[in-house]
Image (spheres, grey):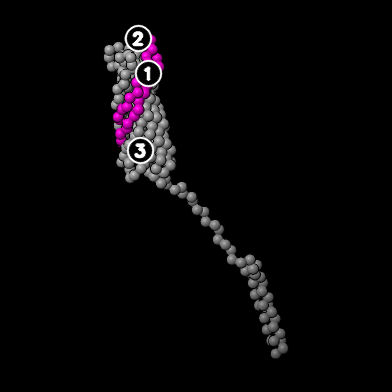
Amino acid sequence: MVDIMTSNKSLVTRVSALALACALPIVPALASGPVAPPPQVVDYVMPAPAFDWAGAYGGLSYSAVTGRVTQAPGGTPDMESVNGWGAFAGYNWQRGNFVFGPELSYIDFEANYPPFINQQRNALELRARAGYAVNNVMFYGFVGAARSEFFGGGVWNSENGVSYGLGAQFHVRNNFFVGVEAARRNMSFSTGGANIENDIDTISLRIGYQF
């Protein structure tokens, strides 16, 4: 009887020791608290511009026109200051705040070079515009090819050259916009073995609609 009781106590002691040994690795984990999950990586997406400038547009312009002959045999005085009406049409692409695209512009005017009989009329341009938009306001520059007509030697001569300038555009309501622009055109042509060069400057008020 004593042997059986001794054997049972020995068995209980072994089981208790085994249970304690299994429980020891769990104690540090419980003491340190629950393990926090790893932080999630969130991709930042840049918000889209508040105003969309992309698409076709067109409108009318009213310009103050001045000019001068920069090279001619014997010299020619400055062109008289006149006003002219015009029209323009173009298309914009937009990448973030950057806006760019082609534009066709025409200004109808006719001016003299007093007291000479020389005259200047019309300005047609194909431009490449690029600008930076801040919401519904855009500041831009452009460069392009220009064409005009100069009266000299008893005939109207076609002039070709380059145009460049700066402007600002502001959308006022819905798709309507207004703008102001300063431009210069460096023109030239040859007649009777002589080369004629002149500048045509404009300050324009523009009103248009974006489709």
- Mark 1, residues whose alpha carbon is within 10 Å: few (<14), some, or many (≥20)? some
Please name the residue that numbered disc 3 is placed on.
178
Mark 3 or mark 1, which is nearer the start of the sequence?
A: 1
- Compared across the picture, whether 131 is left or right of 154 comes to right
Q: Which residues are magenta?
A: 58-86
Q: CA distance from mark 1 to mark 3?
A: 31 Å
Residue neighbourhood size for the residue with mark 3, other residues' Cα within 10 Å, grouped as few (<14), some (14–19), many (≥20): some
Name which residue type carries label 2: Gly
Q: Nearer the viewer, mark 1 or mark 2?
A: 1
Query: Mark 1 is on which residue type?
Result: Asp
Query: In which quadrant of the rendered image does the N terminus lie?
Result: bottom right
Quadrant housing residue 153 = top left
Residue located at (39% from left, 45% from top) = 51
Disc 2 secondary structure class: loop
The earlier-in-sequence mark between 2 and 3 is 3
Q: Which of marks 2 and 1 precedes in the sequence?
A: 1
Frontmost residue, 204 versus 131: 204
How far across and down, in percent of the image, does residue 119 sit? 31, 18
Instruction: Give me the residue at 49% from left, 51% from top.
Output: 43
| Residue 39 appears in the rendering | yes
Q: Amino acid at mark 3?
A: Val
**Callouts 2 and 3 close, C-beta under 8 Å:** no
User: Does the stretch in magenta take in 186?
Assistant: no
Cα–Cα gap, marks 1 and 2: 22 Å
74 up-or-down from 13: above or below: above
Image quadrant in which you'd find residue 141: top left
**Where in the figure is residue 67, as x and y percent of width and height?**
37, 21
Instruction: Choose between 44 and 51: the one closer to the eye.
Output: 51
For mark 1, what is the residue?
Answer: 78
